[in-house]
Image (cartoon, rainbow, N blue to C red):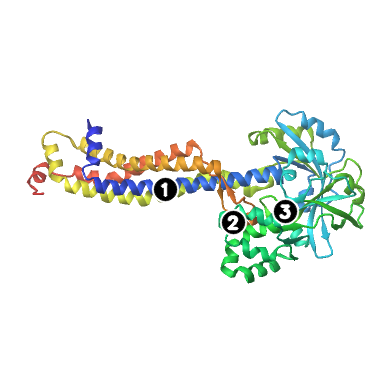
Amino acid sequence: MIWSISWKNVWRNKIRSLVVIVAFTFGIFGGVYMVAVFYGMIDSRVKLAIGNEASHIQVHHPSYLDNNELKYTIDDYQKYVGQIENIPEVKGVSPRIKILGMASTSGNASGVMINGIDVDRERQVTGIDESLVEGGGSFFEEDGRKPIVIGEKLAKTLKLTYYKITAGDLDRLSDKKNMRAVLPLLDSLRDKSFRTEADFEKALSGLLGKSEAEKYSFHIKAASIKYRLKRRIVLSFQSLDGHIAYDAFRVIGIYKTGNSVFDGLNLFVRMSDITPVASLHSGQVNQLAILLTSVEHDDQVAEMVKDIMPGMDVQTWDEIMPEAGMYTSTMNYYLFIFMIIILLALGFGIVNTMLMAVLERIKELGMLMAIGMNKKRVFSMIMLETVFLGMTGAVIGMAISYGLIWYTGSTGLDLTSLYQEGFEAMGFSPMIYPTIGWESFIQLIFLVVLTGVLAAIYPARKAMKLNPSEALRIDM
């Protein structure tokens, strides 16, 4: 009976109750959805880190990670690969020769990490071959002498990109509704080449005006960027025997991941091309990258690999990239703290609402106590009213947030045109797929109930202290 009375009491003053419920709805919705967006960002970052950068497990010589020196190699790696691949949870193993060096073109030079790879095995472990940009060639699919695949960021640094609006580019831009107004103006730039991004942006500003150029430049640059394939890149580095080695490679592919730092540093060549230049012997590599069927098996498989390769340094992805591991391990704490702050603010609103409700009902409460309702029941009634008030708003807020998370989790939040450079500089993808687990909703329900209970204590104590005879004499 107390439950029924408490629920009816919530709606005695509909406007006041609705104000609190709406506040709870928006507070819970905003908090849950924002956390889901953060979860989506972290999930995307971890997938990119594992899929393109670190894999689930890496094996090195114990001294290699101290300063990435070429001399610290894994010898006769072939005898270990077969044993590792026989582990059921292993999806692929890729040997790599990793050398810090310099990449030079006629336009510029940059420090790089040279990755000598077995192309077929690398495809099993990373998604670089699926990250090639449009018009960016291929991933070692062409027969040629000493091919090389580089990131788009590095291509820009080495001045292997240029900008040119073609008829095909204008056709693609016409598919975007917000671009149609500027297409006639862009036609005047058709087939004109611009060597640098700065030159192209200057031409756009002069043509469209500064504000319009800033508004449309992202899509225009994305459509008109071109790559100078087949150009020569000279790699220089210190070989195993101590001398400075040089060799020239031809660009056959340009890739782009969600991490511009990675794209600006890493380039890929065939292991067979770089081994003799580095004075290495066949079977010598600096790293074995291991991809698993699931991240849940990483610690278990790492122990098995240690038994297969005793004396080697075996690390899981969260040890190799501790910042990515930290994101996943601390996200639940962020949710907890974030929601506590929101509920704390909403809790003061409930205290105020329930205190007003108690003061308005002093005579009524005094009458109930006079006819036999004990103080424990009065306390329970006020407590339940407060919990009902908070839970009603919380359930509505969670239902709305779940629906929006489900929808945007499928379609994604595309922040590419607004924040791509900033996101990619931090290693995050600008395409976010919000996600959140059921356990988070369960935790949230617990926090809402706790907030209601704590917020009800003061108004309920106020009601318990009423003297029935004095309360009945009050003229409301």
Labels 1, 2: front one: 2
176 or 430, nearer to the observer: 176
Local crowd size for mark 3, using a 10 Å CA cut-off: few (<14), some (14–19), many (≥20):
many
220 or 48, nearer to the observer: 220
Mark with earlier residue (1, 2): 1
Residue at the disc numbered 1: 340
Q: Is residue 235 above or below residue 472?
A: below
Q: Amino acid at mark 1?
A: Ile
Q: Is residue 161 above or below residue 38?
A: below
Give the residue drawn at x 46%, y 49%: 338
Residue at the disc numbered 2: 417
Q: x, y (%) of residue 246?
A: 90, 57
Rounded to the nearest whole Å, what is the CA distance between mark 1 and mark 2?
Answer: 33 Å
Picture quarter containing residue 461?
A: top left
Rounded to the nearest whole Å, what is the CA distance between mark 3 and mark 1?
Answer: 39 Å
Q: Amino acid at mark 2?
A: Ser
Q: x, y (%) of residue 95?
A: 81, 41
Local crowd size for mark 1, using a 10 Å CA cut-off: few (<14), some (14–19), many (≥20):
some
Mark 1 element type: helix
Residue at the disc numbered 3: 263
Specify whether residue 206 is in view: yes
Mark with earlier residue (3, 2): 3
Q: x, y (%) of residue 105?
A: 83, 62
- In the rendered structure, find residue 317 and report the number of the disc placed on it: none
Local crowd size for mark 2, using a 10 Å CA cut-off: few (<14), some (14–19), many (≥20):
some
Left/right placement of residue 264 relative to residue 182 reads right
Labels 3, 1: front one: 3
Give the residue drawn at x 78%, y 56%: 112
Picture quarter containing residue 96?
A: top right
